[in-house]
Amino acid sequence: MAIVRELTWRRWLAAVGVSLAVATIVLVASLWVGTQDVQVGRAVAVLFGQADDADARMAYQLVFGLRLPRTLLALVTGLTLALAGTTFQALLRNPLAEPYTLGVASGGALGALLALKLAPSLGLIWAWAGPSPVQIAAFVGALIVVLIVYGLGRSMGMLNTYDLLLAGVTMALFCGAAMLAVQYFADYRELFGMIRWMMGGVETVAYRDMVSTLTLVVPAWLMLLALAGALNQLSLGEDLAGARGVRVGWVQAVGFFAASLATGAVVAVCGPIGFVGLIVPHAVRAVIGPDHRVLMPCAALVGGAFLVVCDWGSRLVLPAYGRLRGLDLEGVQLPIGVITALLGGPFFLVLLLRSRRSERVVR
């Protein structure tokens, strides 16, 4: 069991400040990252009314109309998935728990696919800054899955973490089969959009996607961060946490609900991007320790920066490969979900082997 060091304001500010600095540096650097060379200074000049020629306006559109909203969406998505993954690992006291392995992301993806297929025919389309029908459907799908998984885990009066993970994987497989059924009844145009969406991506050409996502994820962020102290107590065990005054059932319900709300919101916009909630919490925990009062905000900020860097790879890998092979791949992008899966798959296997070895030592 990890020992939680005494937390001081100086230590909290230092850890969160470094994480915030990393996220800020990555965010600013993203203005220069792309397949086209852009004079960012000219774009900034347009922003402050100091330039108005055609080249400057073009630079402004590329930087602030394309790159910045995409980067902000990646930042919000990575922050949300990392925070949800940290919460699930604390609630289940299992290093393998995250929205992807618990089936929450798959449930959100199924809900979103159903909305993509049915919403136009049902007339469920509106244009406003709040949640879209796809986001609402993704949230409902994620919530249904997490209620089923949570109910199975509570069936014996306690959360059996390994059974819960098994139930999550089973629900993910079921949702995957259901998504295949939805795709089978889609036409060619709908099918192409669904398959590309399921690979994950943060492509956006406006700030609307980010604004509509924030209406759902910001309340979830606040709820999850408010649970940090209680999650520290739960890491010692449910009985001991209850003896110390923690309302265990309430904390678990709020944590699962808020993490599912946030996951469903970002899945609806970006598709099922896996393993961010697995890799980042472990990496940050190894550096700053297990105290969730500092771990959760730091993991969230680093998670946002991590997904932004993965988005750099999605934009630059294939064009760089094309230049090496003499192929014209400029502007061709690799889905960001593919990159996170390639990084997260081996990481998951390493964690699984370590957990099995720990069990053998305990026995």
Image: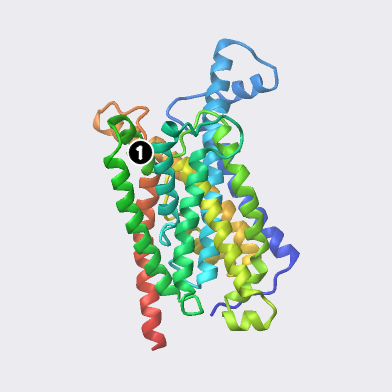
Q: Residue 262: x, y in percent?
A: 55, 51
175 or 124: nearer the eye? 124
- Please tell me whether residue 133 is drawn above or below residue 346 in the rendered image: above
Specify the quadrant of the image occupied by residue 330: top left
Q: Is residue 87 visible from the viewing direction of this image?
A: yes
Q: Is residue 278 visible from the viewing direction of this image?
A: no
Specify the quadrant of the image occupied by residue 97: bottom left
Name the residue that disc number 1 marks.
194
Q: Residue 357: x, y in percent?
A: 36, 79
Q: Amino acid at mark 1?
A: Met
Colour scheme employed for the rendering of this structure: rainbow
Q: Residue 128: x, y in percent?
A: 60, 31
Residue found 63% across the figure and 12% down from its top: 52
Residue found 37% across the figure and 43% down from its top: 198
In the rendered image, the residue lying farthest to the bottom is 363
66 or 89: nearer the eye? 89
- Please tell me whether residue 217 is drawn above or below residue 355 in the rendered image: above
Q: Is residue 329 left or right of residue 221?
A: left
332 or 287: nearer the eye? 332
State which quarter of the image contains the C terminus.
Answer: bottom left
Specify the quadrant of the image occupied by residue 5: bottom right
In the rendered image, the residue lying farthest to the right is 9
Q: Is residue 125 left or right of residue 314?
A: right
Q: Residue 304: x, y in percent?
A: 54, 48
